[in-house]
Amino acid sequence: MMRAADRILGIALLGLAAFVAVQAQSFYVPFSYDPVGPKAFPVGLAIILALLSLVLILRPGPNGQWPSAATCCRLVGVLVIMGVYALLFTRLGYTLSTGLAILCLARSFGASWVKALVTAVVMAVVTYFLFSDVLEISLPSGQWLTALS
Amino acid sequence: MFDFLIQGFDVALTPLNLGLAFAGALMGTLFGALPGIGPINGIAILMPLAYTLGLPAESALILLAGIYTGAEYGGRMSSILLNVPGDAGAVMTTLDGYPLAKKGMAGPALGLSAVSSFIGASIAILGLTLFAPLLAKFAVMFGPAELFVMMVFAFSSMAVMMGKDPIKTAIGAVLGILIGIIGVDSGTGVLRYTFDLPELYDGIDFVVMIIGLFAISEILLMLESRHNPAGEAEMPVVGRVLVSMKEVLFCKAAMLRSGLIGFLIGVLPGTGASVAGAVSYTTEKRLSDTEGTFGEGDMRGLAAPEAANNASAAGAFVPMLTLGIPGSGTTAVLLGALMLYNITPGPMMFTEHADVAGGLIASLYIGNLVLLLLNLPLAGLFAKVLTIPRWVLVPAIAVLSFVGVYQLHSDLSAIYLMLVIGVVGYLLRKLGFSLATVILGYVLGGLMEDNLRRALSISGGDLGILWQSGISIGLWVASVVILIGPWLWGRVRRSMQA
Amino acid sequence: MTLIRSLRHCAALTLLGSALISGQSLAAEKTECIAPAKPGGGYDLTCRLAANGLLETGLLDRPMVVTYMPGGIGAVAYNHVVGVRSDDENLIVAASTGAAVNLALGKFGRFGPDQVRWVGALGVDYGAVVVSADAPWHNLDELLQDMKKNPGSIPFGAGGTVGSQDWMKAALVAKSADIAPRNLRYVAFEGGGEALAALLGGHIKVFTGDLSELQSQLEGGKIRVLAALSDERQEGPYADIPTAKEQGYDVTWPIWRGYYMGKDVSDEQYQAWVDRLTELDDNPEFAKMRADRGLFPMHKFGPEFDQYVKSQIQQFKDLATEVGLTK
């Protein structure tokens, strides 16, 4: 299992190397003042990468433990939370989207509903003032706020 | 000859300016501690404010210099405590800083990094005071050819990081270089691997890269360890919070060497704190890691990059003050601030605006002292971050990452990219890669390619330019020595024993 | 004691600062300037120039927010305005000659210069041809005559890639002496500072930079500015620098710093911005702010500026085709 991971990685990297090299051929260079040009480096790296991946496929080493299927689902869950957070970041505005994201993240890291809710409200509001008033960073205020006012 | 410095201390020690240095140091620490919001942003944001408030030139500069130094101190905190580098210079700090925190040594680690930062900065400020005009001449001697060989040296010294798994170290570096290639080619303007996405034209931003690779993957790893019965327990904080004198003395050679290396690299145009951290760490590992403890929480492995990145931050002032050429992005912003006050740094700076130059150098001294005094006793307080329950810590990391990237790009695609890079970072870590080598490849690879091609355009394709100057030859020799030296030394020793 | 007093100073300053930033009347419109780059660059300066100027002269009573939107050498911001905020009447975006070059080369994706409304330019900088003080050339003619003999023998350097506005300066100078730009020996650096360092170190022989970034070098006596790429000589520290034109080479390179807005902004709102910037431009206090930032006056607003940008883009397009830069 562990060795298999290295083999899969090796094959994937071999594919990447091929892609890098092929893609480099399509660069349109009207003219270049240096004799090396923009293609040489990527192609050279692709060759090195291909050789290294071959070694990896032939002599895979042990690597870390992989999470169970259930944990994998949880990992995907956290990623989805962060993806949705990004999606809502400008639409709902900073405070609301951040509050929601904190609530969900705190829950997935084992906080009770009450604790998660308190954390979400406090952190969202405090960081908003920290960022916008102390550090002068412009944060999205959200379309709903402008619609209200 | 040091009239300007005495004059400078006179200026810097007025109550208002002392207060500003203090306020700047605190603000800077805050800016630096937040991933993605480094000194550049801090200064760019506060500069107009200082101008609007009508502060005199030297006061504004003192405030901004305080922010600059403070950010260097702040940047290491998240490296040590969370394994998330706060800025470019703090990447190498994670290598030994985080393992130390894991061992329950967060307090001493923070203290030591404050001491090393102070030592590194002191070396650099001393160098700045004594040799600035001389060093400016040294800096411009580094042309593209010399900088290319410098990168060859940096990659050779990276070989020491190949320790356990040479293949994966090499693959990591290659992947990093490939990521660095994405975007407009700086030589010909050709777009490389951008897939017609304008968001990728400028390449993958450094902040997006480190926040994704380190912070997002860290969140995923934390979640995994929560559901893994054999996983690590929550981190303990051991009672001791102060770094001991013995520990500081143990690292003194590492600090002095790295401070010097960092300063010299900081002086060069086009290289910065990340290169300084990398070269000093790998050099130190080469020189003193006899038991193979670097990377597992060796105090010297923490002291080296910390001394170096602070030294390089101060070193970047040399070309700025003497030539009017900014040595880093942050000094470029500072240069802009000076221009606002009708002061144009350059060869005449030390004679025509002695109060400003002296005041700036004096405020660097004072800022660093303030930061050392602030950071030593507060190390225990900062270490408490580790006792924050995960359900508070993780949302906080997520929010900081989002804001850090958003305020730089005002664009959601950068955030999505950060998440994708986070997944890649997680997979790489699970597969046993060191993220530091990926980052080093990313930083050094671009410099290496650009400078090689610049050198060859200057010479019209003649490879001879790469070993034309004494500096290049010296660096070639150093590269060979650092690659095969230890192996040769081992053989000599064995044959002597036999 | 002194410490406490100075802390109080600081506290007062901070309070004052936040009052300036957030304490203004909420009724006023919230205006925004997008700098299509990271903090600290030329676009940041362009936005800050408008923001500080409008605030200090009282033309706006709430500070204009400056937002950073790097990516695609300005393309990300351009696409954002065209696609998402084309009717936002409170938004201006910083632009420069560099943006016009990129538009001409089609680097802003499928959108052309007609997709936005060009408001005006508050300042301009000019290109310059620089050599080191010990170089054998004392005027532009000597340099270009030398180059004609063997164009590839003198390494030029500047802070941008082939096709960037920095390269254009070198290319146009060469062209003015009938030297094909592709026969140059040109080295692309990351920003003018690095190129200047390479010139001082003797690694390149000629640097095509901007006048404003040379200000600090003029007194130092380490460089020699052979020509300013402006129509007329500039004043102050630049008075001794001859233009390329007066030396018989017809090449100018203004680097304007201006703004555009979305295409669907109403004529009244567009005109309001044009009037606001024109009034700012006439203010003597603002003239000092502009000079502090190393910029010269430009005096081009509204339709005149719009025309100017579009004809400039056409000119760049022709040049690009001529030297074989675009397919």
Image: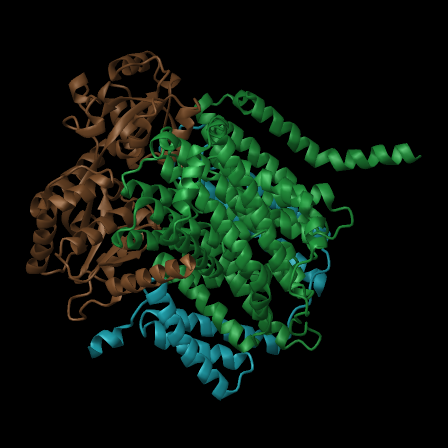
Chain colours: A cyan, B green, C brown
Closer to the camera in the image, C51 or B116: B116
Q: Is residue A66 left or right of residue B117?
A: right
The answer to whether residue B497 is above or below residue A118 is above
The answer to whether one can see residue C327 in this image is no
Residue reaching furthest to the front: C1
Tell me residue B289's x, y (percent).
Answer: 74, 46
Tell me if residue B203 comes above or below residue B398 in the rendering. Answer: above
Rendering quarter of residue C61: bottom left
Q: Percent x, y for residue C93?
A: 22, 53
Question: Is B454 placed left or right of C43 in the picture?
Answer: right
* Left or right of residue B463: residue C318: left
Q: Position of residue B47 (x, y in %)?
A: 32, 51
Specify whether residue C312 is in view: yes
User: Above or below — where is B300 with respect to C222?
Assistant: below
Which residue is more in the foreground, A97 or B298? Answer: B298
In percent of width and height, residue B469 lies at 55, 21
